[in-house]
Image (spheres, rainbow, N blue to C red):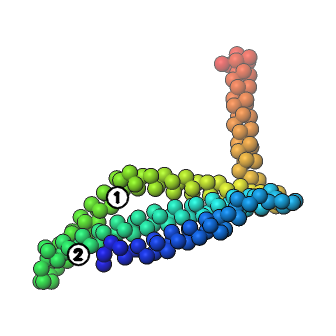
Amino acid sequence: MDNTSFEPAHDFFNAWLDTYEATLGRLVEVPALGPSREKYDKMMTGFSKFVNFYSTWMEVNSDFQKVFADAMNRVNERVAAEMGEEISPDKYKDFYNIWIETYSSAFKEFLKSGHFASDMGKFTSYFLEFQKYNREMLEENYLKQMNLPTKSDIDEINKELYSLRKKTKELARQIQELSGKG
């Protein structure tokens, strides 16, 4: 198994992404008209956020597959060089140790790289954007329609509850001072 075994899948995904950007991606940019304009704009924004999130996820996944394949090649080379032909329980233990060492070092190298940090930052950013969009759409299209509390409603209630508790403590302190018990 060589390092290029994942290249066709990566090439296919890049071709799909290029095709999307040349076709459906342009639909996102088309301004909507009419009474459903706002809803259409929100849907297209959501679709765009999903594609950004999905494509970044696929890139991260592809990078992990490359590291995995590279580690597997390293394990195969070391096993062939170090273990010989004899099979015994000790050899299985040696194989396990080689496997753990090799994979640990391969993934440590990858996880310490600036490439990984950059990709994870981009992935996290797109994920949070997509998650925020989904929450907003859920609130707008379901929770408000069913007269259920939204996150902003709950935040407002919590803020008011905090304020009331604070005021109650202040009034209790003042009552104790005025009654001479404080």
Whether 61 is drawn above or below 135: the answer is: below
Quadrant of the snapshot with the C terminus: top right
> Which residue was labeled with disc 1?
110
Helix, strand or loop for disc 2: helix
Q: Name the residue located 74 percent from the left edge and 34 percent from the top edge.
A: 164
Residue 87, image quadrant: bottom left
Q: Amino acid at mark 1?
A: Phe
Q: Name the residue located 72 percent from the left edge and 21 percent from the top edge.
A: 174
Q: Is residue 146 left or right of residue 49?
A: right
Q: Position of residue 35 (x, y in %)?
A: 87, 59
Residue 96 showing in the rendered view: no
Q: Which of 19 and 81 lies nearest the eye of the viewer?
A: 19
Q: Is residue 113 left or right of residue 155?
A: left
Q: Which of 117 and 144 lies nearest the eye of the viewer?
A: 117
Q: Is residue 21 left or right of residue 148?
A: left
Alpha-carbon distance for marks 1 and 2?
Answer: 19 Å
Q: Position of residue 85 (x, y in %)?
A: 12, 83
Q: Is residue 143 left or right of residue 90?
A: right
Q: Name the residue located 61 percent from the left edge and 65 percent from the top edge.
A: 21
* Residue sitting at the far right: 35
Between disc 1 and disc 2, whose residue precedes?
2
Q: Amino acid at mark 2?
A: Asn
Quadrant of the snapshot with the N terminus: bottom left
Using the image, tell me which numbered label, if any, was put on residue 76.
Answer: 2
